[in-house]
């Protein structure tokens, strides 16, 4: 299936028919913001009816391609009321647990749509991506299911646990040394000549799949005051913004929830631009952080993410590694949710935002837990006692 659909620049509104990802002006393209007459799942009388599919397929009428040929069951993740986090956070907390997607991150929403577009498309025998791990894992799994060849480009220093998880799906893996931001652009430039459709983090197809995250939030909780989301390339923030605007156009809400984005302090080009009140994001030098999945020093949709924040009245904040580790533990111990470090950053940001009075204590806030992680990859051995059987009773009384 091919998607001949029109693409539009979010910034200058120029339209573009190609499979290109970026406008002549340099900003990213997306499919035009839709104004649906009828919201999927709503009956003619406006009441709820049985949705036509589970997960992202429920919203098939609002997607540029039918994800069915590649779908592993992306989307439809739970929105969990995490009341035991309220006291520390200082507001009413919900968790959108994207770790429950088929390969453990929200990337599956975009991969299902992106890979489905390549199935049977002439001129693209292969699908590709540039990733820190989750998107490579997700793209490779969806390509395997759809029977499409897959090429993934990862940084040379990608952690071993991630590499072996990706290799299970048997894509061609290329580890590339050097500037990760440049690699994103190199891939988009090299792909067409080689018959590889790169569905990188912020390309129109991926953004189209990922906007379903916002649809689900609006459907489950139309009176949310704010959404807090980790940001790296800015692709997912763009997708959530688009989905919220489409939900508003369909009459689901009058006012958009405020969008708060979170970066790791060691690599925070979008937060820096926000603090300096600048209109565009400039690249920084990469720094080490435990939040590996969001360490992009040159975010291709950084400026679009800034626009999303300003449009909704939110903010971009950066948080340190110590807070991130503590938040990851708090998510597990007070909400039963397993998250990788990057996905725990919203909780740290929330402490900051409620302290500053940006978010009030009676407000309803959804933290997007973007990925579940690979388990035990931080190298620490939990401190647990080992006892003999005859020491069991004593151990249970301790
Ligand atoms: C990819 C990823 C992000 C960042 O998403 P962008 O679309 O690149 O901004 C955040 N968290 C996790 C777990 C990810 O895998
Ligand atoms: Zn443009």
Image: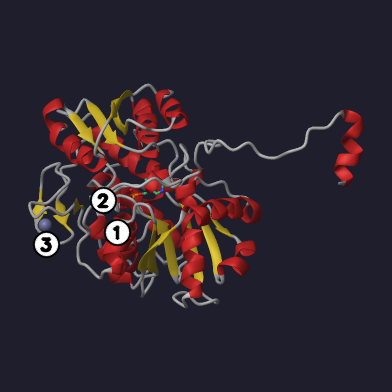
Q: Is residue 355 left or right of residue 286?
A: right
Question: In the image, residue 297 lies at what x, y percent?
Answer: 28, 49
Is 122 rendered above or below residue 212? above
Name the residue nearer the viewer: 103 or 218. Answer: 103
Rendered image: mark on residue 270:
1
Per the image, label 3 sits on a secondary structure element best described as loop
Rendered image: mark on residue 299:
2
User: Does the closest atom of ligand 2 sit within 8 Å of the Cβ of label 3?
Assistant: yes
For residue 139, which quarter of the picture?
top left
CB contact under 8 Å: marks 2 and 1? yes
| Quadrant that contains the N terminus | top left
Look at 57% across and 54% down and name the residue there. 326
Which residue is disc 3 drawn over? 12
Question: In the image, residue 94 lies at what x, y percent?
Answer: 54, 62
- Judging from the image, the colouring scheme is secondary structure
Q: Earlier in the sequence, mark 3 or mark 1?
A: 3
Question: In the image, residue 185 lies at what x, y percent?
Answer: 18, 41
C-alpha separation, residue under disc 3 versus residue under disc 1? 20 Å
Q: Nearer the viewer, mark 3 or mark 2?
A: 2
């Amino acid at each position: 299936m091919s998607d001949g659909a029109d693409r539009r620049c979010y910034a200058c509104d120029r339209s573009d028919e190609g499979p290109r990802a970026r406008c002549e002006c340099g900003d990213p393209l997306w499919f035009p913001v839709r104004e649906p007459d009828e919201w999927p799942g709503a009956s003619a009388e406006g009441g709820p009816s049985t949705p036509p599919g589970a997960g992202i397929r429920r919203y098939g009428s609002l997607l540029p391609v039918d994800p069915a040929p590649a779908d592993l069951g992306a989307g439809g993740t739970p929105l969990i009321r995490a009341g035991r986090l309220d006291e520390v956070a200082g507001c009413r907390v919900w968790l959108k647990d994207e770790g429950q997607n088929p390969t453990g991150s929200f990337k599956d929403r975009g991969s299902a749509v992106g890979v489905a577009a390549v199935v049977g498309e002439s001129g693209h025998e292969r699908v590709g991506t540039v990733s820190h791990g989750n998107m490579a894992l997700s793209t490779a799994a969806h390509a395997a299911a759809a029977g499409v060849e897959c090429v993934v480009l990862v940084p040379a220093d990608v952690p071993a646990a991630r590499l072996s998880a990706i290799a299970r799906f048997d894509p061609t893996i290329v580890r590339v040394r050097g500037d990760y931001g440049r690699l994103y652009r190199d891939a988009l430039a090299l792909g067409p000549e080689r018959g590889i459709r790169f569905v990188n983090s912020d390309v129109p197809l991926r953004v189209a799949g990922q906007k379903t995250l916002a649809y689900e939030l609006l459907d489950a909780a139309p009176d949310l005051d704010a959404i807090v989301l980790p940001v790296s390339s800015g692709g997912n923030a763009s997708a959530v913004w688009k989905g919220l605007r489409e939900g508003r156009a369909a009459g689901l809400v009058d006012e958009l929830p405020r969008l708060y984005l979170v970066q790791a302090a060691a690599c925070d080009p979008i937060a820096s631009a926000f603090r300096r009140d600048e209109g565009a994001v400039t690249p920084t030098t990469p720094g080490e952080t435990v939040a590996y999945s969001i360490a992009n020093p040159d975010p291709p949709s950084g400026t679009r993410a800034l626009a999303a924040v300003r449009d909704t009245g939110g903010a971009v904040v950066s948080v340190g590694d110590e807070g991130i580790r503590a938040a990851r533990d708090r998510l597990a111990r007070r909400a039963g949710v397993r998250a990788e470090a990057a996905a725990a950053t919203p909780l740290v940001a929330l402490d900051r935002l409620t302290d500053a009075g940006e978010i009030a204590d009676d407000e309803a806030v959804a933290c997007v837990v973007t990925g579940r992680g690979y388990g035990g990859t931080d190298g620490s051995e939990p401190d647990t006692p080992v006892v003999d059987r005859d020491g069991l009773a004593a151990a249970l009384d301790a």
